[in-house]
Image: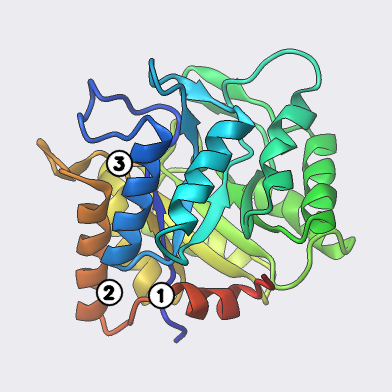
Amino acid sequence: MDKLIITAAVTGSRPTKEMNPAVPYTPAEIAHAAVDCWRAGAAVAHIHVRDPETGRPDFRTELFQEVMDRVRAECDVILNLTTSGLFLSGPDITEKRLQPVALGPEICSLDIGSLNFSDRVFENPPDWGRAAAERMRQYGVKPEIEVFDVGHIHQARSLVEEGLIDPPPVFQLCMGAKWGIEATAENLLFLKGKLPPDACWSVLGVGRAQLPMSALGIVLGGNVRVGFEDNLYLRPGVLAESNAQLVERVVDLARMLEREPATPDDARQILGLTR
Ligand code: MG
């Protein structure tokens, strides 16, 4: 089996300091969390940005740029910038969502399909997926295709078959989001069976599902994502003190199951990144 690529999703757009005081808001806090996760064994940092004052989800390019500059000054962790734009509205939303691509990270997330997502509709119409794949290819940015349900894989496969996504296609199987596919072993095997044969895949479980989905990802030869974007707890009722603590836990689990964590350079090779 390949080495295990651990992605740390350090802030996302939903968790707040009221939920867990260690949730990072400012570019300095977000960068610090990403570097700590790299020290703990993460190869990839998945980045969202927040309004530094209020902590609300933000999408300003200068905030992404500051996080990138701060992280790159400290380490070689692979940066994966979000293009989810879940809280954006108004005209030109596709262009707004694609702004992080032009900053030249190695990876950007690409949400391929729509779903009811907690209290809102997460809209990813077909022309969005196509425009995002084309833009990422133009900038040499690897798309990480986020899927929240099985039909999303079907949609991604059509882009792969059309040649809009270079091999190997990289998938993040997002499980247990409200109201995406539930985080169960059966569902993970089902999703895995639908992937293109050459896909690299990773799994995330939301909330309490983070640990069991990580264990399954490790033994099934996939990769894993942990961090505050998906889960704020170390154990039921016990908040994690940092993102890095969640990375440390999955590193321990991987070593117990005899999979060595990938370094960023290992991950570049596995994912076919050409910096
Ligand atoms: Mg995200």
Q: Secondary structure at mark 2?
A: helix
How many marks on residues?
A: 3
Q: Which residue is mark 2?
A: 254
Report which residue position mark 1 lands on. 4
The amino acid type found where label 2 is placed reads Ala
Task: Specify which label sits upstream in the sequence, 3 or 1.
Answer: 1
- The residue indicated by pointer 3 is 231
Distance from mark 1 CB to nearest ligand 1 atom below 8 Å: no
| Among numbered discs 2 and 3, the one appearing first in the sequence | 3
User: Looking at the picture, does residue 130 appear above or below residue 49?
Assistant: below
Query: How much space separates mark 3 and mark 1, taking CA atoms?
Result: 20 Å
Between the C-alphas of marks 2 and 3, the distance is 19 Å
Left or right, 275 with respect to 92, comes to: left
Q: Specify the amino acid type for callout 1.
A: Leu
Q: Are marks 2 and 1 in contact (CB under 8 Å)?
A: yes
Which quadrant is home to the C terminus? bottom right
